[in-house]
């Protein structure tokens, strides 16, 4: 069985290297696109009880070198002082409004739908209330002709614990980048999406996922793909959004379990196949390493560890460099062992009920 594991690791590593290296070449082929004017963009920011997390976003909005047409904050029935903080902190030169979600409606999807109804521009961008935005975000938007643009999101790295927490997302986004080069994006984040309003309204009439409280981003990506609208993945640094990491490991497990549940409902066979392929490779790698270590074959184990890290470097380096997380790539061989326990905790947590911001998470 050990020999079978070796063969599988070799073959899967070769496939991974080809997938990423050739994919990177496809990404680097320039495709000229027209630019969207910031005057044609409204920013939508749904929020609920974010008084302790919204200040970094407001500070970054005040530092923007170019301002969009309008910023709409949609209050999803907060019972704290978030709205008051927004009015107090934002500079006078920023055109913004705070609107209230109607009684009887709740959740991010409903908040975004209300926001889109208020949008007067051709495009809108969705951000989360705990994000930080780059100063030059609106300086260059070469996305004319696309209906949905998946823009880059990373977690903050305020501590080593938070850095380790984001490694699984960084690897997932690296795969997303390669998949987009070959076929299409497989994941998106509602913390940073650019959407053509007319396309959203067209797609929204056909969606049947509003009974599921989470997954607005993934369901939206699926709906645009199924209705043949043009989608694009962009990872330029100017458009990079940094969002807050989970506060602790319990919050990490809770967040990842919510993501796993919504992925099951989205039902993207291609995305599931990519994810399961990587997980299978990871499980077999860890099993082979464990057998070698138990049999005191330390030299062979070290050689496999070095080769796996080289495969990671070749595969993921381009993406990690783009989002300025290169140092974290060196931790991956160690963190992969930690994932065994974390993913088991996530799987166990996924079978239990979940709440999010004081509400039952309907998935």
Image (tube, rainbow, N blue to C red):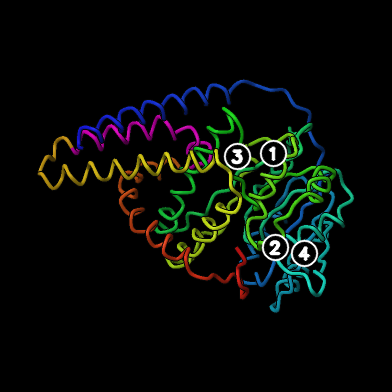
* Residue nearest the viewer, comparing 133 with 42: 42
**Residues at marks 2 and 1, CA–CA distance in whole angstroms:** 20 Å
The reply, left or right, for residue 183 in relation to residue 260 is right
* Residue 237's disc number: 3
Between discs 1 and 4, the one toward the N terminus: 4
Nearer the observer, disc 1 or disc 3?
1
Residue annotated with mark 1: 225
x 70%, y 48%: residue: 220
Between discs 4 and 2, the one toward the N terminus: 4
* Residue nearest the viewer, comparing 313 with 181: 181
x 73%, y 36%: residue: 140
The reply, left or right, for residue 123 in relation to residue 183 is right
Provide residue 29's location: percent of width, then percent of height. 61, 20
Provide residue 3's location: percent of width, then percent of height. 20, 32
Total residue callouts: 4
Residue annotated with mark 4: 74
Which residue extends farthest bottom? Answer: 79
Provide residue 152's location: percent of width, then percent of height. 60, 43
Nearer the observer, disc 2 or disc 3?
2
């Amino acid at each position: 069985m050990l020999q079978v594991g070796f063969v599988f690791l070799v073959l899967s590593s070769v496939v991974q290297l080809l997938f990423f290296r050739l994919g990177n070449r496809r990404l680097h082929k320039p495709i000229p696109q027209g630019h969207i004017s910031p005057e044609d963009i409204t920013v939508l920011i749904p929020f609920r009880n974010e008084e302790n997390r919204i200040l970094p976003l407001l500070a970054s909005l005040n530092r923007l070198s170019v301002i969009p047409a309008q910023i709409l904050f949609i209050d999803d029935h907060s019972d704290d002082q978030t709205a008051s903080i927004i009015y107090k902190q934002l500079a006078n030169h920023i055109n913004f409004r705070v609107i209230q979600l109607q009684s009887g409606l709740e959740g991010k999807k409903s908040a975004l739908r209300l926001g889109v109804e208020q949008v007067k521009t051709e495009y809108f961008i969705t951000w989360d209330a705990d994000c930080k935005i780059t100063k030059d975000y609106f300086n260059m938007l070469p996305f004319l002709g696309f209906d949905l643009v998946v823009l880059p999101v990373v977690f903050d790295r305020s501590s080593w614990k938070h850095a380790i927490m984001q490694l699984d997302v960084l690897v997932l986004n690296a795969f997303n980048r390669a998949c987009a080069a070959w076929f299409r994006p497989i994941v998106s984040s509602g913390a940073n999406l650019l959407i053509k309003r007319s396309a959203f309204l067209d797609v929204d009439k056909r969606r049947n996922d509003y009974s599921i409280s989470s997954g607005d981003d993934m369901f939206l990506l699926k709906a645009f793909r199924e209705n043949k609208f043009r989608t694009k993945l962009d990872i330029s640094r100017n458009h990079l959004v940094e969002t807050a990491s989970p506060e602790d490991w319990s919050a990490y497990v809770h967040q990842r379990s919510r993501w796993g549940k919504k992925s099951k409902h989205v039902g993207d066979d291609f995305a599931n196949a990519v994810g399961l392929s990587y997980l299978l490779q990871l499980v077999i790698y860890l099993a082979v390493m464990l057998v070698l270590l138990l049999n005191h074959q330390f030299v062979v184990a070290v050689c496999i560890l070095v080769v796996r890290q080289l495969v990671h470097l070749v595969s993921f380096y381009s993406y990690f460099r783009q989002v300025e997380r290169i140092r974290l790539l060196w931790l991956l061989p160690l963190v992969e062992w930690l994932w065994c326990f974390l993913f088991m905790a996530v799987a166990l947590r996924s079978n239990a009920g979940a709440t999010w911001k004081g509400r039952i998470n309907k998935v």
